[in-house]
Amino acid sequence: MERKVTIQDIAALAEVSKSTVSRYLNKGYVSVEKADRIQKAIDATGFSSNAFARRLKAKKSGMIGIVMPRVDSPTGGKLLRGMSFALEEVGCRALFESSCLDGNRELQNMENLAQCGADGIIIVSVGITEAHIALAEDLRKREIPVVFVGQKHPKVTYIKVDDFGAGRMLGDYMRRMGHERVAFVGVTEKDQAVGVDRKDGFIELFTRGSRGAVVDFIETGFGLEASYEKGSEILAHRPTAVVCATDGLAFGILRALHERGIDVPEEVSVAGFGGYEMGAVTYPPLTTVAFDYEKVGAQAAKMLLKLLSEEPVASVADFPPHLIERSSVIKIEKE
């Protein structure tokens, strides 16, 4: 088995920074003296025998295209951090575009990145359509592999968190906390993971075997302003708890309830999905089902690198969530 050698190993042996090694591998400027030390370290460790290193030497660009749905999302920031660390380890650079939550724009982003010379593309998609599948296949034929993040489809390579399982986890928790009437604030069903799977998982567990359990669905856009504007509509259902498809939506609901003088959680409990760091400092701190998005991003990058090295890659659909119980949800005692 070939010994896996990282850029950090080369940098330590050559007594240079990782960024210097990265520049050397990508044909950037490095002084003659440092370049000589780096090459000697590569020769000594066998780093050049690494399959991906061979691709870099075969006049590949060393650039990986990344398509994100938003530039202001806490989830996106964690995904990007994980991707960046994993790509940096092999001397790759990221080329970034944003789809602004537009599926058609995602397709243009992918083509733009291919035209700019990206060796491969990671796309955090709002939904995988037949057009996405066709373009991914076309790019594969052009030796530009694609990994989708956040959504799944059997015809593409993907990695996603277990959204349905997360919904079930929160449904079970709210049921155990004694709630029977819940308003579920969600997004468009065009987003299968966030708009469908989380909601369906929640309803399936929350209502199982309970004649009195009711879930009223309120659709909204992404972002706290969109959910904030739904405050009156949500309260018209007289819920004991509001469950939001993302923590960002939950922040908007907290604001709407506070402005109306409604005590959280004594009058209405609130919970979300995502595990955003801000949830720990809201008032009250937000109960949430969290995902390790940084780890997801790192694994997505590693999957793409394997594809570039022509290694077999299996899609991942069950990246596990975990419940963070805070004080935004109260237990209702039965009389």
Image (cartoon, helix red, strand yellow):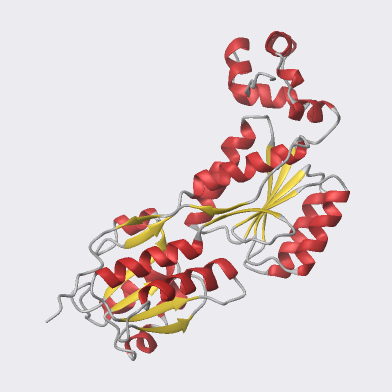
Q: Is residue 56 left or right of residue 9?
A: right
Q: Is residue 137 left or right of residue 245?
A: right
Q: Position of residue 190 (x, y in %)?
A: 62, 74
The one of 61 and 135 positioned closer to us in this rendering = 135
Q: Position of residue 65 (x, y in %)?
A: 72, 47
Q: Is residue 185 left or right of residue 143?
A: left
The one of 322 and 242 positioned closer to us in this rendering = 322
Q: Is residue 258 left or right of residue 91?
A: left
- Residue, x 55% and y 49% (percent of image)? 79
The quadrant in which the N terminus is found is top right
Placement of 241 over or under 149, stated as above or below:
below
Q: Position of residue 12 (x, y in %)?
A: 57, 14
Quarter of the view holding residue 263: bottom left
Placement of 265 over or under 69, stated as above or below:
below
Whether residue 156 is visible here, answered yes or no, is yes
Residue extending furthest front? 209
- Residue, x 62% and y 33% (percent of image)? 88
| Count of numbered circles in the view | 0
Q: Position of residue 69 (x, y in %)?
A: 61, 61
The one of 132 and 199 positioned closer to us in this rendering = 199
Residue extending furthest bottom? 236
The quadrant in which the C terminus is found is bottom left
Residue extending furthest left? 335
Whether residue 111 is visible here, answered yes or no, is no
- Residue, x 38% and y 66% (percent of image)? 272
Residue extending furthest right? 142
Quarter of the view holding residue 14: top right
